[in-house]
């Protein structure tokens, strides 16, 4: 049976899956990743760990699942975006999307290139790769000079390792601060003004095009057959959007991974948005964009709470934490949680923001803290969902690893007052969405809408219906929640740890 091999390289893990022509999953595997947190604000990963993870999953396919490399007709990827990853003969760590050391450089670019933000459809921020590249030139000029080129998604580094091609897709390109959102080409004049050499940028390649073929050297390391086609694929937001079946204007969904986001498909960029920190990304179907509101605090805070209130973040402890959440009643006995444990970039853009509990009284118990964490995370998602899809009704799709918490899924439905649809194997939907590009390249689908119609939407799904009484209760609590950050903001910026 022929398969398409798909890898999703996230922050916490790499997921691999083999899909047959009907979209059925085989050989589902994952490998955990480590992140380096430095004392000067560094948030980095070793790209060689991604490569080793790919090899580990491939070895499992051949030696545990009994797959044969000649069954793989094509492979493709999704991956974390907004990274800065040097390509060259020196081993350097990748600067991740959540690393915000380049704040001063972002300010300088905004002042020096005032028209750039209109062209790229986004703001230049401390997390923007263009700002990070300028930061690198100042603080680590040797790294910048020795890099022959840079890529900006983890999946593009693996494409380079497999094929030798240095490419990226337009969805990833839209996060760099360097790609014109309309033309889907690099803004070379502004890039030069910002001091970056355009020759160091990857080629922009449509997601469904073949980036290259597995080299003999890569085949020897992975046991994939030499000359296997490698399709460019998409940055994680584009792949997740396809995986959620969001291919038409107005389609929306929520993703809960280590970080999270809410997104809606549009046919243009709206000039006035109510959320600070929103992105506009090139979607895989042509002439559409994804308006996406990203959250730094999602599954990572869930994991923090499990470790804090139960123990280590093992599967059994997640189950114990789930029981704690369900023991507490809606409203968490008056306790409200602001979930900005890792700072935040949307709905507020504040690296100094912190998490906070309010309402601790003598009857508050540990299980109330557990539920308050999950309610606070749900309120944060509600804030961006309401801003993106104001007035919208109907079911909203929820994907990502956070969907394993049934109480969280139900809580989101109760908070937003809309049914929440959770596809089966939701954790792997970004990888399955990434497969759309290879399905098209292989002739298994005519376009992205055809893929969504025949592969995504027929999949089994659970639906969580909102409880009206809980919705009304949460509406009142939400008003208090919305007052917490403005009240605490002066403290964050006066007292910095």
Image: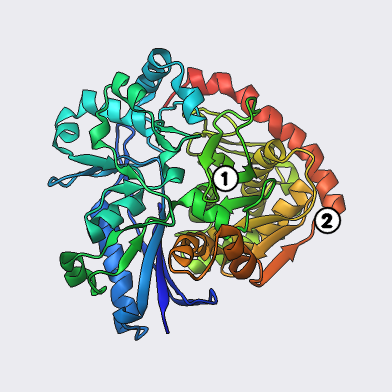
| Residue neighbourhood size for the residue with mark 2, other residues' Cα within 10 Å, grouped as few (<14), some (14–19), many (≥20) | some
Q: Is residue 277 visible?
A: yes
Residue 485, horizontal then vertical, whole percent: 62, 28
State whether residue 448 is above or below residue 41: below
Disc 2 versus disc 1: distance between alpha carbons?
A: 23 Å
Task: Give the residue drawn at x 29%, y 69%.
Answer: 228
Residue at image location 21% in from the left, 55% down from the top? 164
Q: How would you rate the neighbour count of disc 1 (Cα within 10 Å): few for under 14, some for 14-19, many for 20 or more?
A: many
The residue lying at 63 percent from left, 54 percent from top is 246
Q: Secondary structure at mark 1?
A: strand
Q: Residue furthest top?
A: 111
Q: Split into 4 quadrants, where in the image is the N terminus?
A: bottom left
Mark 2 or 1, closer to the camera: 1
Q: How is the image coloured?
A: rainbow
Location of the C terminus (image quadrant): top left
Secondary structure beneath dot 2 equals loop
Q: Position of residue 151 (x, y in %)?
A: 30, 43
Please say if 227 is above or below 60. above
Q: Which mark is residue 261?
A: 1
| Residue 404 visible to an observer of this rendering | no
Viewed as shown, does residue 86 lie left or right of 373?
left
Residue carrying label 2: 467
Would residue 466 appear left or right of 76 to someone viewing this image? right
Seen from the viewer's position, the closer of residues 288 and 271 is 288
| Position in image of residue 115 (x %, y %) | 46, 18
Q: Residue at x 55, y 77 (%)?
A: 22
x, y percent for residue 179? 41, 34
414 displayed left or right of 295: right
Which of pointers 2 and 1 lies earlier in the amino acid sequence?
1
């Amino acid at each position: 049976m022929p398969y398409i091999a798909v890898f999703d390289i996230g922050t916490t893990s790499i997921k691999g899956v083999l899909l047959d022509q009907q979209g059925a999953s085989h050989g589902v595997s994952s490998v955990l990743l480590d992140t380096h947190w430095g004392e000067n604000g560094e948030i980095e990963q070793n790209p060689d760990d991604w490569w080793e993870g790919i090899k580990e999953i491939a070895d499992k396919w051949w030696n545990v699942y009994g797959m044969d490399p000649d069954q793989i007709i094509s492979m493709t990827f999704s991956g974390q975006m907004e990274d800065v990853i040097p390509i060259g003969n020196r081993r350097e760590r990748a600067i991740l999307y959540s690393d915000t050391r380049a704040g001063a450089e972002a300010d300088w670019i905004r002042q020096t290139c005032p028209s750039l933000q209109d062209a790229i459809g986004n703001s230049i921020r401390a997390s923007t790769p263009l700002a990070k590249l300028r930061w690198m030139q100042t603080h680590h000029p040797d790294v910048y000079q020795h890099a022959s080129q840079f890529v900006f998604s983890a999946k593009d580094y693996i494409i380079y390792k497999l094929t030798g091609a240095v490419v990226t897709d337009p969805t990833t390109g839209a996060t760099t601060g360097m790609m014109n959102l309309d033309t889907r080409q690099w803004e070379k004049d502004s890039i030069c003004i910002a001091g970056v050499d355009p020759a160091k940028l990857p080629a922009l390649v449509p997601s469904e095009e073949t980036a290259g073929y597995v080299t003999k050297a890569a085949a020897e390391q992975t046991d994939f057959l030499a000359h296997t086609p490698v399709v460019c694929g998409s940055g994680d937001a584009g792949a997740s959007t396809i995986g959620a079946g969001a291919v038409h204007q107005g389609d929306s969904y929520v993703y809960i991974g280590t970080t999270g986001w809410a997104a809606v498909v549009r046919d243009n960029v709206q000039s006035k948005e109510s959320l600070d920190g929103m992105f506009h990304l090139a979607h895989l179907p042509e002439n559409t964009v994804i308006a996406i509101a990203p959250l730094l605090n999602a599954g990572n805070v869930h994991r923090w709470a499990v470790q804090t209130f139960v123990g280590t973040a093992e599967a059994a402890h997640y189950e114990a934490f789930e029981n704690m959440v369900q023991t507490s009643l809606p409203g968490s006995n008056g306790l409200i949680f602001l979930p900005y444990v890792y700072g935040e970039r949307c709905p507020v853009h504040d690296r100094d923001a912190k998490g906070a509990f309010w309402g601790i009284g003598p009857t508050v118990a540990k299980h109330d803290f557990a539920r308050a964490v999950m309610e606070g995370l749900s309120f944060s998602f509600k804030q961006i969902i309401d801003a993106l899809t104001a007035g919208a009704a109907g079911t909203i799709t929820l994907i990502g690893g956070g969907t394993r918490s049934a109480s969280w899924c139900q809580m989101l439905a109760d908070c937003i007052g809309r049914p929440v649809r959770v596809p089966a194997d939701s954790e792997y939907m970004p990888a399955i969405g990434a497969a759309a590009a290879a399905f098209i390249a292989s002739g298994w689908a005519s376009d992205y809408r055809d893929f969504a119609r025949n592969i995504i939407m027929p999949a089994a799904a659970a639906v969580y219906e909102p409880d009206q009484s809980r919705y009304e209760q949460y509406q009142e609590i939400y008003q208090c929640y919305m007052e917490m950050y403005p009240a605490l903001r002066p403290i964050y910026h006066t007292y910095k740890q």
